[in-house]
Image: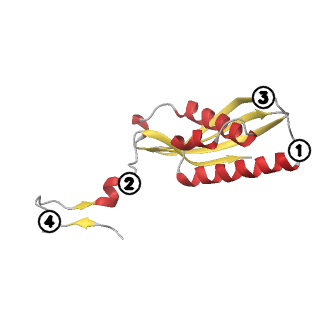
Amino acid sequence: MVNTVSSSESPRNNSIRTTEFFDPQPTPRVDLPDPRETIERLALIGCEIIAGIRPVEQIGRWVTEDVYRVVAERSIAARRSRVARAETTKVAPLIMVGLTLITEPRDGVVEGVSLVRFGQRTRAVCVRLEGLDHRWRASALALL
C-alpha cells in the first residue's frame, strides 16, 4: 500500500509518494566511484566471513538485506561444518584476490567476478553492484 498525501491534506499544494521519497534512490554511474575496489573488497570479505575469520556484521553496510541474510546463513553452515569435522586450525587460511572482470549491463549497475585464492583452492566470487544513494550496494553475492 502506498501512502500518499494529497493536496487537500497538505498545506502545500504538492503530492508526495512517501514510499518513493524514502526508498533508496538509484544513482547514475557517473556519480559513483570505480567499482573494482568494491567488488574485490566484497570478494575478500565474503571469503573471510565463510572461513570464520571475520564476523558477518562487517559486510552489512555494503550489501542489501537479502544478501546479508544469505551470507549469514552460509557462514553459520560453514561454522557447523568445521565443528563437525573437528577442524581446529589456529591459522587462518590465506585468502588473496586475483583477476577481476567487470561488465556494466546498464547505467548504475555493475556485475563483476573475482578469482580468489582460498586456502588450496581458487574460487570465483560473483558480485552485482547497484548504485543506490550515491554509493555501491551489492544486490547479489555468490561464492562459487
Residues under labels 4 and 2: Cα distance? 22 Å
N-terminal label among 1 and 4: 4
Task: State which quadrant residue 40 falls in.
Answer: top right
Q: Secondary structure at mark 3?
A: loop
N-terminal label among 2 and 3: 2
Residues under labels 2 and 1: Cα distance? 45 Å
Q: Secondary structure at mark 1?
A: loop
Q: Identity of the amino acid at label 2?
A: Asp
N-terminal label among 3 and 4: 4
Asked if the residue under mark 1 is in contact with the one under mark 3, i.e. CB atoms within 8 Å, the reply is no
Mark 2 lies on residue: 23
Residue 94 — which label? 3
> Can you give x and y, in whole percent of width and height, for residue 52 in the image?
73, 39
Residue 86 — which label? 1
Closest to the camera, between mark 3 and mark 4, is 3
Q: In the shown orientation, is residue 87 left or right of residue 74?
A: right
Residue 52, compared with residue 81, is above or below; it is: above
N-terminal label among 2 and 1: 2
Pointer 4 local density, CA inside 10 Å: few below 14, some 14–19, many at least 20: few
Instruction: Identify the residue at image location x=64%, y=53%.
Output: 70
Q: Identity of the amino acid at label 3?
A: Leu
> Can you give x and y, in whole percent of width and height, for residue 77 in the image?
75, 52
Please indicate, yes or no, whether residue 110 appears anywhere in the rendered image: no
